[in-house]
Amino acid sequence: MKPVFKRPKSLYDVPFHYCPGCHHGIAHRLIAEAIDALGIQERVVAVASIGCSVFLYDYFAVDVLEAPHGRAPAVGTGIKRARPESIVFTYQGDGDLAAIGLAETIHAANRGEQLAVFFINNTIYGMTGGQMAPTTLPGQKTTTTPLGRRVIGEGAPLKMAEMIAALKPPAFVARVAVNNSKSIFQAKKAVQQAFRIQVEGKGYAFVEFLSACPTNWKMTPCEANRHVSEALIPEFPLGIFKGDL
Amino acid sequence: MRKTEAVYNRKLVKGNEAIALGAIAAGCRFYAGYPITPQNEIPEFMAGRMPAVGGTFIQAESEIAAISMVMGAAATGARAMTSSSSPGISLKQEAISYMAGSEIPCVVVNVCRSGPGLGGISASQGDYFQATRGGGHGDYRTFVLAPHSVQESYDLTMLAFDIADRYRTPVLVLSDAVLGQMKEPVYLRGYKGREIRKPWALTGAKGRKARYLKSLYLNEGELTARNWKLFRKYRRMEKEIRYEMYLTEDAEAIVVAFGCAARILKTSIQMARTKGMRVGMFRPISLFPFPSQALAAISNRVNRFLVCELNTGQMVEDVRLAVKPGATVESCLCPGYIPTPNELFREIKKRYLASNP
């Protein structure tokens, strides 16, 4: 019998610690599948960030460095420049990439560093218990915006994919979702492309995942999946903003 | 100077350039930095030289990014360095703490200026506590080397890379505005150390299991074990302690100083000697670990110490902890300005005559 579905070899055979309905597991799997598909597992050095995904090294069977909060693109820059044969990716949440690490994010992109940056945008701080993120939706209630986020005073959601696509050097910028099988197939292509660009030495790639956080959204997994379609995608349109698949 | 020295490459360079030359000689092939006075000669030198030796120079968007880049490069096993001056070193403490916790070696140069805040651009030793007590958050230390000449700026930078690799730790070279900006002839004797294997480096999991470098330890007992491991390592580093004893053999009083203060004091002590005062100097070269035992040994026969530093009294605490009970430890403090040899001579004379009427 021919197996048609199995665990990617770039993932360890361990259960994820993520909450039920969280999209980290899907994003992890897509990244591991792309690493397997391109046969680059032995070259990958991943950069874990601070947030729910800090335990990247518990799941990915690749070398991993744990970066300070927000600094993953700078740390990744150091790895890639010191060892150009490595394939380097960062995996960062919205607080890490778009708040405390905004400078590192923009400047690494603007230098055209040979990195794949995976951005998990779930509009909220997960690990610390549901505070406002730079991508929190207008009106969204979080533990630090109990009355809902006010655009004037608390800010409008930062559109990271659009901001990075406005820079000249990045080779590939996409925003994807993983809340249904159709979007997962699109996301899979984008992730593979992000790695392929680096393998071919073509430069910087950025993939933003619209991601569900049912626990901190206080929703069931199914409600959270619908919320991605109904609330996140209208604010953060999906698509390829730079380069092509 | 011995005859054989003539064959060495002798150059007139600034202290900052000597640091950059030492780093490149020691095999440093990754440098990231951010402009700040008075250390700009280091990134400028690296920008020109690194590409020529097949290395990488990056002008980072911030001090924080620069040290984070160094962390990434060093994690792959490369010899990596960043440099800055006091306010910039404060910003770098984040990743220095992470590297201490993750046991990633690197070299950080602080061409110290005066503070607090933006302070001034003149030489200071106000960062002694920051340098020797860890500097960032958490229970860690960095090895600290303090040159007092341009030659030492070159030599100790090379040594810093060896110590960093040997103990898998960040090493701080604590220079200052005077040493960084002054020019002296330097013998470029080249690198005599040895680069060691790094079986922990992140090079891609080819033919081996995947590995990681991290500083997060949440499981019960893990962090305690980690902190004890670091503690034992810092104890082992005491093997690398370095200091200079200057005219101490017959001394009745000892001046303790490091860096440019020690440099100025050598002249002051020579002046005192011509007046018949038996004064010597103890100069710590490694500030952490501090040469406490050597100082304690001196205090068995000398019981008068004068600590001279360009701050309001920081190293004096380490001296007090080191000397035997009963020894007198006084301070001569110059916070935010550079004393002349004459001024320090007068300080020595005043105290020497007070106890030898």
Image: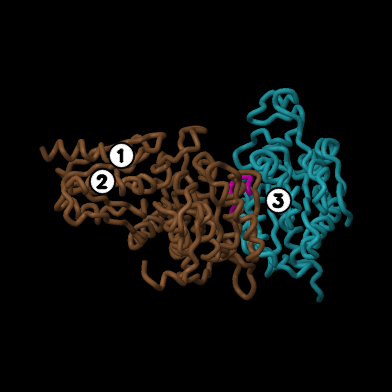
Chain colours: A cyan, B brown
Classify A142 as above or below B52. above
Residue appearing at x 32%, y 52% in the figure: B284
Residue B342 is tagged as 1
Distance Cα–Cα, label 3 vs label 1: 68 Å
Circle 2: residue type? Met
| Mark 3: few/some/many CA within 10 Å (<14, 14-19, 20+) | many
Distance Cα–Cα, label 2 vs label 3: 71 Å
Residue topped by disc 3: A24
Residue A237, located in which quarter of the rendered image?
Answer: top right
Residue appearing at x 44%, y 40% in the figure: B123
Work out which residue is located at the far left of the displayed protein and give it. Answer: B357
Q: Residue A234's x, y, as percent?
A: 86, 36
Q: Residue B234's x, y, as percent?
A: 37, 57
| Mark 1: few/some/many CA within 10 Å (<14, 14-19, 20+) | some
Q: What secondary structure is found at the residue carrying circle 3? A: helix
Marks 2 and 1 on same chain: yes
Marks 2 and 3 on same chain: no
**Part of the protein shown in magenta:** A65-71
Mark 2–mark 1 CB contact (< 8 Å): yes
Residue appearing at x 24%, y 49% in the figure: B322
Mark 1 chain:
B
Circle 1: residue type? Asn
Mark 2 chain:
B
Residue topped by disc 2: B271
Residue B308, located in which quarter of the rendered image?
Answer: top left
